[in-house]
Image (cartoon, rainbow, N blue to C red):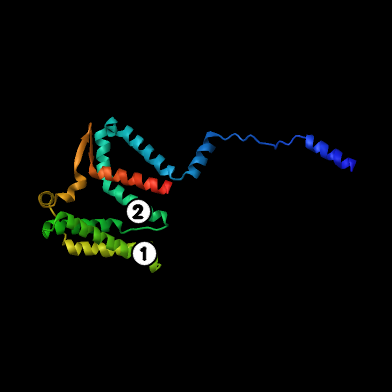
Amino acid sequence: MAQAQEFEKVLSSSDTSVAAFDEHKSAVKRIQHFLHSTPAAVPLIVLVLAIIVFGITIGGRFFSSYTLTLILQQIAIIGILGAAQTLVILTAGIDLSIGVIMVISAVIMGNCAVSYGMPSALAVAIGLAAGAACGLLNGVLVAYMKLPPFIVTLGTWNIVMATNFIYSANETIRDTDVDTQAPLLHLFAISFKVGTAVLTLGVIATVLLVMILWYVLNHT
């Protein structure tokens, strides 16, 4: 009994700190850890480096506000489609038909407003409804019929593209006709200047959509 009490006394007075190993991480290790923990940073870093290299190669004019905003104008449509595609990819899906669905929706809007003489707002609504119907078809085949999204959207891509060729008869609608008969269709093309930068409503819509999507994905 006395030995047990003496052992407990020695044990209680002993050092209770846990051995720690000071592991010094090098800069390369820290970068690797950051890239592994934040995979979304990889394409961003590649994009920034590509912009820097390209800008240095062709000269300082590339970094002018006019040039950068011109690039934003050119990618506004792709940016909106890409934001929508992000939600599909995050759910382990893919949509190959998103481009042709956008095209046939625009063709329907243009024909309804210019060729058929419908009000611009109604033409936009019909075009959006057509695009939504195509998306609904993809969703039903994938979610309820349990078909692979790659195969489904590849098939609808061909169907919608062929339908667009037949419906439009490979005819174009002139911008002047749209400006005079359906200016609402050029809403996102309305431009305004901020200093030397030239922005459009399409660019503003793209930026707002990306910001909303970022907030929803990170805070909801």
Kind of element beneath mark 1: helix
Q: Looking at this view, name the residue that lies furthest to the right.
A: 2
Q: Position of residue 111 (x, y in %)?
A: 15, 58
Q: Amino acid at mark 2?
A: Gln
Q: Which residue is mark 2?
A: 85
Residue 151: assigned label: 1
Position above or below: 171 against 15:
below
Residue 163, horizontal then vertical, whole percent: 22, 64
Q: Is residue 36 left or right of residue 148?
A: right
Sequence-wise first label, 1 or 2: 2
Describe residue 112's horizontal placement relative to residue 102 as left or right.
left
- Say which residue appears at 13% left-offset and 58% top-offset: 118
x, y percent for residue 130: 24, 61
Residue 126, quarter of picture:
bottom left
User: The disc labelled 1 sits on which kind of residue?
Assistant: Ile
Quadrant location of residue 58? top left
The answer to whether the residues at label 1 and label 2 have Cβ atoms under 8 Å apart is no
Which picture quadrant has residue 52? Answer: top left
- Residue density around tag 2, few if under 14, some if 14–19, many if 20 or more, within 10 Å: some
Of circles 1 and 2, which is in front? 2
